[in-house]
């Protein structure tokens, strides 16, 4: 269910919209969209992920228009997305083809291809850098020149385009079962409303476009005791995935005839979740199950949370709310949830007056009853 504002009182609404623009520009500064695109990478990635639309420039425009409010920016971008026609469907993308810029495993120190820390705040001190107040573009360009020169002198000994999967390494050792391909046509939640019981393709789509904070909170609840033991990141990778489409002029859809149209940046996570299994004669042993997460941009916390919730929903333990797919999937969508909460600001005059009349009637009846009772005495 989606809610939008119902217009009424045209003059007042027009003045409200003028006031909104005044608040955005009243300090005499106008944010450059290109600078938002290049300088707010984390926010750009979050908005793109929750909007299910990969376009850094459009996300930057939405963020500027929304004055940095991510929920409003997502609303704007999803609304724009709904106006776009679908001219092509991409071929299936294998994450093994990712050109990796960051790849870590919390499960193993030494992994095939090595750990690649990449760009992350994980190892910073989390102290405010007041030097950023005086940072200039000239200083940034000078630092960038030195960084590129230093990088050019280092030999890249790792092929970042074909890094092996950590879980494949475990499967070769026989520590994890083989995973069979599911070649069924995935459901599209943007074309057909979600139904229960949901398919896994539906769950993954809702999770990947869910609100980052909502996913993180529910995944944290899982870890604290609502459905799972402590999970571990088997592998997390961030990088670019190639996107190809069938040749639109080839009616036979030849497997070897496709067009490369670009790449998208994504974060992929495979979570290892320990599960205690009871064997014969009451003997218990631990095995590992997998939770999967993938989302647009570098959005690591969300991808990890998605992997945890993916496993919780696959297990489907209704003893915990995090195992109830209706509870989780209906409440993590940013547009649906913020839209419903925001609609409470809209006029509810008729319904509220009806409730108020009911309360007044009850109060009147109580007063009359007390009056009659006192007269009887």
Image: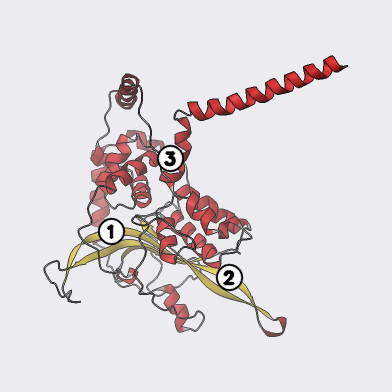
Q: Which residue is mark 3?
A: 339
Mark closer to the chain start, 3 or 2: 2
> Considering the numbered disc 2 on the image, is that residue within a helix, a strand or a loop?
strand
Give SS at disc 3.
helix
Q: Determine the residue positioned at 36% across, 25% down.
A: 8
Q: Position of residue 56 (x, y in %)?
A: 27, 48
Relative height, residue 128 to residue 352 (above, below): below
Front of the two marks 3 and 1: 3
Q: CA distance from mark 3 to mark 2?
A: 37 Å
Task: Give coordinates of residue 147: x percent, y percent.
Answer: 27, 53
Among the two numbered marks 3 and 1 on one chain, the one whose residue lies closer to the N terminus: 1
Pick whichever, 136 or 218, lies toward us: 218
Residue at x-position 30% and y-position 35%:
65
At 73% across and 23% down in the image, what residue appears? 366
How much space separates mark 1 and mark 2, taking CA atoms?
Answer: 32 Å
State which quadrant residue 321 falls in: bottom right
Which residue does the numbered mark 1 point to in the structure image? Answer: 264
User: Percent position (x, y) of residue 304?
Assistant: 47, 59
């Amino acid at each position: 269910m989606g809610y939008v504002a119902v217009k009424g009182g045209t003059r007042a609404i027009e003045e409200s919209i003028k006031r909104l623009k005044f608040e955005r520009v009243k300090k005499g500064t106008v944010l450059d969209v290109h600078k938002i695109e290049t300088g707010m990478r984390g926010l750009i990635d979050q908005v793109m992920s929750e909007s299910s639309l990969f376009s850094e420039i459009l996300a930057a425009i939405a963020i500027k228009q929304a004055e940095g409010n991510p929920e409003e920016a997502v609303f704007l971008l999803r609304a724009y997305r709904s106006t776009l026609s679908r001219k092509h469907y991409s071929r299936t993308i294998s994450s093994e083809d990712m050109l990796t810029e960051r790849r870590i495993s919390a499960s193993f120190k030494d992994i095939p291809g090595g750990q690649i820390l990449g760009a992350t705040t994980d190892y910073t001190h989390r102290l405010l850098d007041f030097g950023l107040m005086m940072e200039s573009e000239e200083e940034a360009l000078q630092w960038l020149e030195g960084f590129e020169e230093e990088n050019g002198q280092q030999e890249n000994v790792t092929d970042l385009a074909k890094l092996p999967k950590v879980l494949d390494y475990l499967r070769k050792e026989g520590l994890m079962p083989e995973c069979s391909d599911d070649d069924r046509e995935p459901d599209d939640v943007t074309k057909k409303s979600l139904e229960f019981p949901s398919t896994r393709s539906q769950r993954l789509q809702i999770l990947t476009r869910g609100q980052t904070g909502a996913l993180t909170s529910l995944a944290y609840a899982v870890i604290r005791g609502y459905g799972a033991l402590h999970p571990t990141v088997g592998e997390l990778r961030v990088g670019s995935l190639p996107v190809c489409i069938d040749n639109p002029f080839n009616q036979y859809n030849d497997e070897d005839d496709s067009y490369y149209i670009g790449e998208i940046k994504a974060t992929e996570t495979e979570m290892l979740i320990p599960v205690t299994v009871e064997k014969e004669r009451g003997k218990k042993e631990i095995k590992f199950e997998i939770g999967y997460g993938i989302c647009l941009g570098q959005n690591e916390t969300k991808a990890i949370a998605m992997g945890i919730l993916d496993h919780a929903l696959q297990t489907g333990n209704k003893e915990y709310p995090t195992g109830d797919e209706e509870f989780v999937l209906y409440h993590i969508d940013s547009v649906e949830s913020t839209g419903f909460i925001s609609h409470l600001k809209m006029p509810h005059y008729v319904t509220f007056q009806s409730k108020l009349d009911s309360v007044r009637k009850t109060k009147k009846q109580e007063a009359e009853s007390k009056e009659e009772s006192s007269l009887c005495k």
